[in-house]
Image: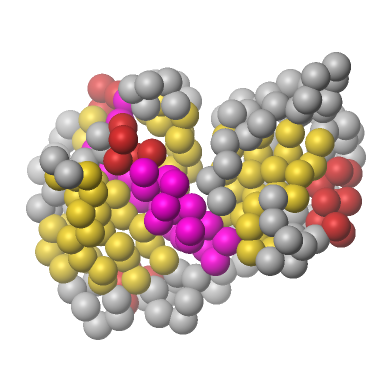
Amino acid sequence: MFAEYGDMATATEAAARLGDGTWVPSDLMVYCAGQRRESFVDGPPLLAVEVASEASRASDLGVKKALYEAAGVPCYWVVDIAGENARVHVFELTDDGYREVAVVGPGDTVRLTEPFKIEIRPEALFRGLPPWRAPVEGAHMARHNGPDLPAADEAFGIDSFLRRWPTGVEKVELHNGSPVFYGRWDERDVAIAQRAYPGRVIRLDQVPGRPGTMTVLPAAATTAPQAAVRLD
């Protein structure tokens, strides 16, 4: 698909450092090859794609869209697979902000030219995908800080928290050095996260049992815990 666009590159589950210094993680980015750094994309990508879960849909279509819009990201797609019928929301940047140019559902087809030529057909896009399975708590849910886990009062680096995900997680992101888990959480999940991230502050960001986020903050010292970027 990218053969005629040799100066473009893609990255999955990557973070972009936007022009104002804001860091935004994305499920998929298309960017100019010269923007790639060792562990992030430097500057607004050409296209940002988010795969929305039940818990993250409001964020992906709200606050996160606004962040990309303010940063000047030309194209933004939200792939909504939370319901029975997958659909893709397609936004393109105009002088007045993002304009939703298409909502592509089952049986629909749309041909786009920005940021590259592509035909989107949700039925073909998701055909043959295996059933989604959430990571589960097990051997990888460490009970002690290991060599890949920073001290409890330190922020996480990009991807240093992988493989420590609670059961039932729909989506995982990293904001200001704090892992954010999307799903339906209650006090039992908080207890699991406390074992997985010993010494840290676990914050439940919604009514127990409702879709939302659970955030892992650095250990409280003499001051209040570091605040994560709220995208719920």
Q: Is residue 193 left or right of residue 56?
A: right
Magenta region includes residue 29: no
Q: In this orientation, which residue lies closer to the viewer: 58 or 13?
A: 58
Q: Residue at x 20, y 54 (%)?
A: 99
Q: Residue at x 48, y 60 (%)?
A: 57
Q: In this orientation, which residue lies closer to the viewer: 227 or 88?
A: 227
Q: Residue at x 85, y 17 (%)?
A: 222
Highlighted range, magenta: 43-66
Q: Is residue 104 above or below residue 145?
A: below
- Of all residues, the one furthest to the front in this rendering is 96
- Of all residues, the one furthest to the top in this rendering is 222
Looking at the rendering, which quadrant does residue 146 occupy? top right
Q: Can you see residue 51? A: yes
Q: Is residue 22 left or right of residue 181?
A: left
Residue 153's x, y, as percent?
79, 22
Q: Residue at x 85, y 20 (%)?
A: 221
